[in-house]
Image (cartoon, helix red, strand yellow):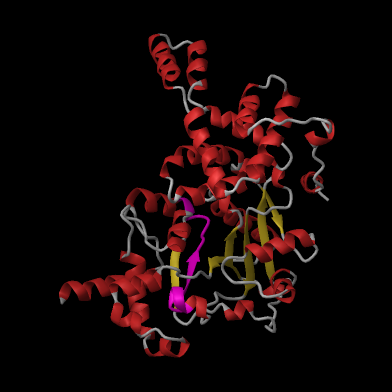
Amino acid sequence: MSLLEGIFSKLFENKYINPRSIFSDFKTKDSIKGLLEKVVNSKGEASALIYSEKLMKRIENLNDKNLLDFFTVLLIEYDLDNKELLKAVNHYTDDNSIQNYQSMTSKFYSKRMEIFKNLNSIERGTIRLVNIRERLLNLLKENRELKKIDIDLSNLFKSWFNRGFLVNYPITWDTSAKILEKIVKYEAVHEISSWLDLRNRIEPEDRKCYSFFHPTMEDEPLIFVEVALTSEIPSKIDNILKINRDKTNPKDFKTAVFYSISNCQNGLKGISFGNFLLKQVIVDLKKEFPSLETFVTLSPVPGFNNWLKENKPTLHKKIVDKNSLLNIEKELLNSSIEYFFEAKHKDGLPLDPVQRFHLSNGASLDKIHSMGNLSKKSIASSAGLMVNYKYEMNNLENNHEKYFSRKLISSSKSLLTKYNKRRYRIIKS
């Protein structure tokens, strides 16, 4: 076992010092407001820990109405001190000394930030804060004024969950049952129907699964990717998921297929991990299997059917079941070309969320497959389409730059040719 693996396994043993065991006789009848004041004003680290633990337990037990009241207190009473901030900025403007700089920067943090930092220091504090943010995001839908609190929390999470703190760990059939249960629970793309199904995805030599973990979150995966090692680029998901399939011999491994990427923590929405994970997995796979030449996804097209409904209602009405797709296969493929190259958000970037994710990582749109997934879920969202996005390490940075600076969609020559021919026909007509 490597040093890193040893450290990681120790972290998973959950040997935290629990402040409740140190202060077993500590009792308080403080209200939440009283605990907030004590968390902010505690001088000693030990007392701050115990007050933070008490506060966290109170918060976790609040119903939505009382939680909204708590966030409102944080919003109003623990915001930035505008007068002190302006005063510090003016002092620094007059004299940009180190002392004035330090004073000014300290005023840019709300008191809420200190409260959240203290809550993070307790036992399982990080995952508990992540769960609280999940509830905050739900409240935000009708209480936009709470966005300030979300900005504070998300800024802290971006710091705490930066790439330097994340551990890429392979998930195997020997991984603890507690983690395997969570892989089943969090799978968001292709439901894992049984333990046999899970075993089929992680135990054979031609199947891999990798996940990012954070040291303070023990056995809670952040994101994971499932990989199929094949001899060629697949076009149908059934060829990957079916249990009684022919296994690929390791000597024939040519292609690594990322067929499912699942974010696990709703409370970490907006904190990006997929970019780092995929690139790390490519490096790891290439080291383990030098014969691998191609790295692609087999991805759904979750926004396609809604786009059809709005832009091509006649075609959309023809989508009934998998049999109906055969009759309109050519129309669907032609419409998908338009969708991938022309359907945009107001920001000028692609409408499809999966396309946005992979192109932002520097991948390119490679192939579109009709009848790629004939499950009811896929037909309802993607009209059965599946797509390969190709990850070529030498082109990732250039593709990423073109995507954000010029809003260009990196694509295979075959798809680009089809798109240009379609556009020419429209212009000509």
Q: Vertically, is 148 above or below 86?
A: below
**Which residue is at 24% across, 71% downward?**
423
> Residue 246: which quarter of the image?
bottom right
**Which residue is at 62% across, 53% downward?**
280
Q: Vertically, is 177 above or below 53?
A: below
Q: Is residue 263 visible?
A: yes
Left or right side of 24 for 313: left
Left or right side of 333 for 226: right
Q: Residue furthest front?
A: 29
Between 143 and 345, the residue placed more toward the observer is 143
Q: Vertically, is 166 above or below 207?
A: above
Between 244 and 321, the residue placed more toward the observer is 321
> How many marks overall?
0
Task: Indicate the position of residue 385 as horizontal and vertical percent values.
Answer: 45, 76
Q: Is residue 417 visible?
A: no
Between 347 and 123, the residue placed more toward the observer is 123
- Whether 10 is among the magenta residues is no
- Whether 385 is among the magenta residues is yes
Between 185 and 105, the residue placed more toward the observer is 185
Q: Residue furthest left?
A: 429
The C terminus, quarter of image: bottom left
**Which residue is at 69% across, 19% downward?**
43
Left or right side of 69 for 178: right
Task: Indicate the position of residue 347 as horizontal and vertical percent values.
Answer: 33, 52
Magenta stretch, residue numbers: 379-397
